Image: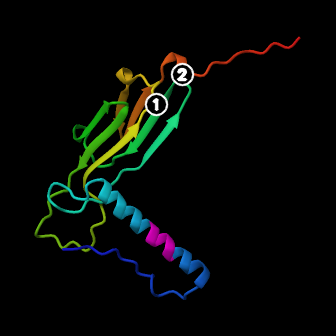
Amino acid sequence: MTLIRWRPLHDVTAWNPGSDLWGEFSNMHHDIDRMFDRFLQGGTSNDGNVSSWLPAVDIVERDADYVVKIEVPGVKKEDIKITVADDVLTIRGEKKQEKESKEKNYHRVERAYGSFQRSFTLPSFVQSDKIKASYDNGVLTIALPKVEEAKPKEIEVKVK
């Protein structure tokens, strides 16, 4: 069964050429982005279904390290794998779908399931042997410490 996105007010409201064309362009842009995301991920999950789940990631640079936060609600800690190879950080995981019951009459299914993979090229001054990760309330946090030489140093300027 193919699910189709429901847009209840899409064709009901009055048409305004200025804002409506921009809205349509924005929707088309979003749909194309999702299509390319599926293509770059391989497009299908293990069971042959199209996978459209790509968790959001924040990357922040601090004085001593970089912090990567990735939202993976509903994913068990055991289903997440973090690897570093050739200065590339790769985060893989899988959000498993609950078994559907034949007794239930589903009216809408919007939650995304399937495998995901995110990869990021690390700067050369990250200490890959000291990377630490923690998982709390559906947020995976990875700390990537910088080598001493890369940390910013403050030099006091004395005025005479």
96 left or right of 57 in image = left
- Identified at 55% across, 87% down, the residue is 15
Counting residues from the start of the chain, the first of labels 1 and 2 encountered is 1
Q: Secondary structure beneath disc 1?
A: loop
Q: Which residue is most to the top?
A: 160
Q: Secondary structure beneath disc 2?
A: helix
Q: Amino acid at mark 2?
A: Ala
Q: Amino acid at mark 1?
A: Pro
Q: Which residue is most to the right?
A: 160
Q: Quadrant of residue 38?
A: bottom left
Residue 113, relative to residue 126: is it above or below?
A: below
Q: Quadrant of residue 84?
A: top left
Of residues 103 and 148, the one drawn nearer to the viewer in this rendering: 148
- The residues bearing labels 1 and 2 have C-alpha atoms spaced at a distance of 10 Å
14 left or right of 119 in image = right
Q: Is residue 27 magenta?
A: yes
Q: How is the image coloured?
A: rainbow
Quadrant containing the N terminus in the rendered view: bottom left
- Identified at 39% across, 43% down, the residue is 70
Q: Which mark is residue 123?
A: 1
Q: Is residue 83 magenta?
A: no
Q: How would you rate the neighbour count of disc 2 (Cα within 10 Å): few for under 14, some for 14-19, many for 20 or more?
A: some
- Identified at 37% across, 25% down, the residue is 131
Q: Position of residue 116 (x, y in %)?
A: 28, 49
Q: Which residues are magenta?
A: 24-29
Of residues 2 and 148, the one drawn nearer to the viewer in this rendering: 148
Q: Position of residue 108 (x, y in %)?
A: 28, 71
Q: Which mark is residue 95?
A: none
- Provide the residue designation for mark 2: 150
- Identified at 55% across, 80% down, the residue is 20
Residue 53, relative to residue 20: is it above or below?
A: above
Q: Quadrant of residue 48?
A: bottom left
